[in-house]
Image (tube, helix red, strand yellow):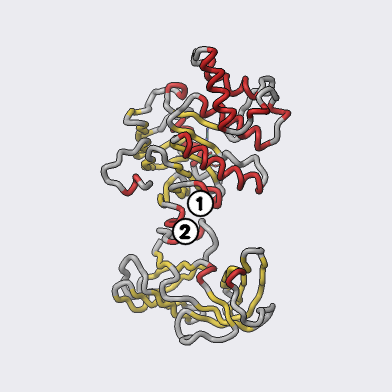
């Protein structure tokens, strides 16, 4: 399932050069994006980056200042929310407190004028889908947070929209429930064959659920890619830094040949050698180098060739996370290098301890060279 790689595939939602201004301020700034049928798509970014504004424009609660939005080939300008093939689930769920679970799910169907018997059948189907059959007669205040969330979902999908827009759908749930519910949402999306567009500021959530992620900053899309791509091949310092943990070095491209580059990092006279650069660089050009903690080894013994991709330092912090251990190694310059190793594959070397003198080192294909 990767319609975005198919040049023939038509996007189900096409966002074309959309800008949304509030006064002089562009909350969304000349943004273009394609979302495909049955895709689970995440808009990810820090508070204020414009992701909710974009979602609200898809729903029809806001109109773009310029640019256009096509859904299923149709220009959405001037089309009110209830006439769009989309439905939106709000973070607050907006359930009617005086109505039962059944009543909440049936509400939109009644408004559409659906026949009574059809409504009953649809409500039963929805209750089954979200596993709330026994809770049909309860009111929202008699439910747990997770159950309320499922009622809200059932109510949103009952009308069979083609696209479900979800604004921080799991924001009100505690960590454990959120993790479980992520899988339920993915399951539901698959079963219903819907397109989901979810807004979240939680990168783990986006990584877990989405087919593709748009990483947003200041009203712009910085990168659109699969979770693995944004993690392993971020296109900018911003994305590398925003997604997961990273060690970032600033330096100068010293010798350049094909994908092979040596980067001189000044304060420590470090030489970073990489053979996996995807772009070409010129000698003397300032570049960044990003490397994930799990790509860095920590050892008491120096590596075979300590002249490149290695440095000596002091073990400054050790944090045990159950599945992995994170080491902070302080170099003489004061720079902290973050390294992480899976506890299941931990080497049998004497356990490392605080203040130990250690070497960090990494392979020539372990990091990413970045320019912006
Ligand atoms: P959050 O996660 O905090 O909701 P967000 O990424 O969803 O953030 P938006 O809600 O889209 O961000 O807001 C983007 C920017 O636009 C913010 O700076 C916000 O203050 C501004 N903004 C949003 N709606 C309005 C409005 N109706 N009038 C004026 N400014 C607005």
Residue at 48%, 36% in the rendered image = 191
Q: Is residue 259 left or right of residue 61?
A: left
- Against 120, residue 271 (above or below) is below
Q: Secondary structure at mark 1?
A: helix
Q: Position of residue 92 (x, y in %)?
A: 62, 33
The numbered mark, 2 or 1, whose residue comes first in the sequence reads 1
Asked if the beta carbon under badge 1 is closer than 8 A to the nearest atom of ligand 1, the reply is no
The reply to whether dot 2 and dot 1 touch (C-beta < 8 Å) is yes
Q: Measure the C-alpha gap from mark 2 to mark 1.
A: 9 Å
- Against 275, residue 75 (above or below) is above
Q: Is residue 362 left or right of residue 133?
A: left
> Which residue does the numbered mark 2 point to in the structure image?
231
- Against 331, residue 136 (above or below) is above
**Mark 2 closeness class: few <14, some 14–19, many ≥20 residues within 10 Å:** many
Disc number placed over residue 207 in the picture, else none = 1
Disc number placed over residue 38 in the picture, else none = none
Name the image quarter holding residue 278: bottom left
Q: Position of residue 356 (x, y in %)?
A: 66, 82
Whether residue 284 appears in this view of the structure is yes
Residue at 37%, 40% in the rendered image = 36
Q: Secondary structure at mark 2?
A: helix
Residue at 56%, 29% in the rendered image = 154
Asked if the beta carbon under badge 2 is closer than 8 A to the nearest atom of ligand 1, the reply is no
Name the image quarter holding residue 276: bottom left
């Amino acid at each position: 399932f990767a319609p975005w790689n198919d040049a023939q595939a038509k996007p189900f939602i096409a966002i074309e050069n959309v800008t949304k201004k509030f006064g002089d301020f562009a909350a969304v700034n000349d943004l273009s994006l394609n979302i495909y049928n049955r895709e689970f798509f995440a808009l990810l970014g820090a508070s204020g980056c414009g992701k909710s504004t974009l979602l609200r424009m898809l729903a029809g609660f806001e109109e773009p200042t310029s640019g256009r939005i096509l859904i299923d080939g149709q220009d959405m300008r001037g089309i009110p929310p209830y006439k769009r093939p989309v439905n939106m689930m709000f973070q607050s769920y907006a359930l009617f407190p005086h109505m039962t679970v059944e009543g909440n799910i049936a509400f939109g169907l009644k408004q559409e004028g659906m026949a009574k018997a059809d409504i009953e059948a649809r409500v039963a189907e929805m209750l089954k889908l979200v596993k709330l059959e026994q809770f049909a007669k309860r009111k929202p205040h008699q439910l747990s947070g997770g159950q309320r969330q499922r009622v809200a979902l059932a109510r949103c999908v009952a009308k069979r929209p083609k696209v479900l827009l979800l604004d921080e759908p799991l924001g009100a749930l505690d960590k454990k429930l959120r993790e479980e519910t992520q899988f339920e949402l993915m399951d539901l999306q698959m079963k219903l064959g819907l397109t989901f567009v979810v807004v979240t500021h939680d990168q783990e959530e986006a990584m877990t659920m989405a087919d593709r992620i748009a990483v947003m900053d200041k009203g712009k899309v910085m990168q659109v890619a699969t979770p693995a791509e944004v993690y392993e091949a971020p296109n900018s310092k911003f994305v590398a830094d925003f997604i997961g943990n990273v060690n970032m070095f600033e330096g100068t491209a010293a010798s350049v040949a094909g994908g092979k580059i040596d980067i001189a990092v000044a304060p420590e006279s470090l030489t970073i050698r990489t053979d996996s650069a995807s772009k070409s660089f010129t000698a003397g050009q300032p570049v960044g180098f990003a490397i994930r903690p799990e790509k860095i080894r920590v050892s008491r013994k120096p590596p075979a060739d300590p002249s490149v991709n290695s440095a000596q330092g002091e073990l400054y912090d050790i944090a045990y996370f159950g599945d992995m251990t994170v080491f902070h190694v302080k170099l003489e310059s004061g720079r902290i290098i973050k390294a992480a190793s899976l506890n299941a594959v931990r080497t049998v070397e004497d356990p490392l301890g605080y203040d130990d003198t250690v070497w960090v080192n990494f392979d020539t294909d372990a990091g990413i060279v970045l320019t912006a």
